[in-house]
Image (cartoon, rainbow, N blue to C red):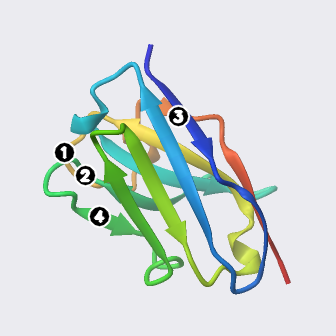
Amino acid sequence: QAQLVESGGGLVQTGGSLRLSCAASGGTFSRYTMGWFRQAPGKEREFVAAISWILDSTNYADSVKGRFTISRDNAKNQVYLQMNSLKPEDTAVYYCAGGRKTIATRDRNAYDYWGQGTQVTVSS
């Protein structure tokens, strides 16, 4: 059974940085598109970033472009989200997701596996 486990969330001040990690197991994740999504209280889950297994192509939401960086280490079955210049509006539960796709898609319905989420809180 494929499993994704996020870690690295926490409380940080505006302008600070955090690095989220997602540990994958039970599947051939080296050939999966991996993504990060987030959900703030009272809002729908939204796309943050994705990385394809083909040439490690990436895709970012406009709201995080230039501040966040997604990367992967297939040898370790890990996906990372480096978050810099954090803002209070980045506060949310962040979810890692994996899908059998070849493109770094924003479509959450394209993802087959999801983690339980990790809380990120940015104080003003």
Decide which of tag 3 and tag 1 comes sooner along the chain.
1
Q: Secondary structure at mark 4?
A: strand
Contact flag, marks 1 and 2 (Cβ < 8 Å): yes
Taking the image as drawn, is residue 44 in sight?
no
Give the residue type that dot 4 points to: Thr
Q: How far apart in space, not on screen, are marks 3 and 2 (Cα)? A: 16 Å
Q: Nearer the viewer, residue 79 or 51?
A: 79
Disc number placed over residue 102 in the picture, else none = 1
Decide which of tag 4 and tag 2 comes sooner along the chain.
2
Contact flag, marks 4 and 2 (Cβ < 8 Å): yes
Contact flag, marks 3 and 2 (Cβ < 8 Å): no
Q: Residue at x 57, y 56 (%)?
A: 20
Disc number placed over residue 52 in the picture, else none = 2
Q: Secondary structure at mark 1?
A: loop
Q: Examine the rendered structure and indicate whether residue 20 appears above or below residue 91.
A: above
Q: How far apart in space, not on screen, are marks 1 and 4 (Cα)? A: 11 Å
State the quadrant of the C terminus. Answer: bottom right
Q: Residue at x 27, y 33 (%)?
A: 100
Q: Examine the rendered structure and indicate whether residue 122 appears above or below residue 67.
A: above
Q: Quadrant of residue 13?
A: bottom right
Instruction: Give the residue number, with chain letter if any, for mark 4.
Output: 58
x, y (%) of residue 73? 32, 48
Give the residue type that dot 1 points to: Thr
Q: Secondary structure at mark 3?
A: strand
Q: How far apart in space, not on screen, are marks 3 and 1 (Cα)? A: 18 Å
Pointer 1: residues within 10 angstroms few (<14), some, or many (20+)?
Answer: some
Pointer 4: residues within 10 angstroms few (<14), some, or many (20+)?
Answer: many
Q: Nearer the viewer, residue 41 or 70?
A: 70
Q: How far apart in space, not on screen, are marks 4 and 2 (Cα)? A: 6 Å
Give the residue type that dot 2 points to: Ser
Give the residue type that dot 3 points to: Trp
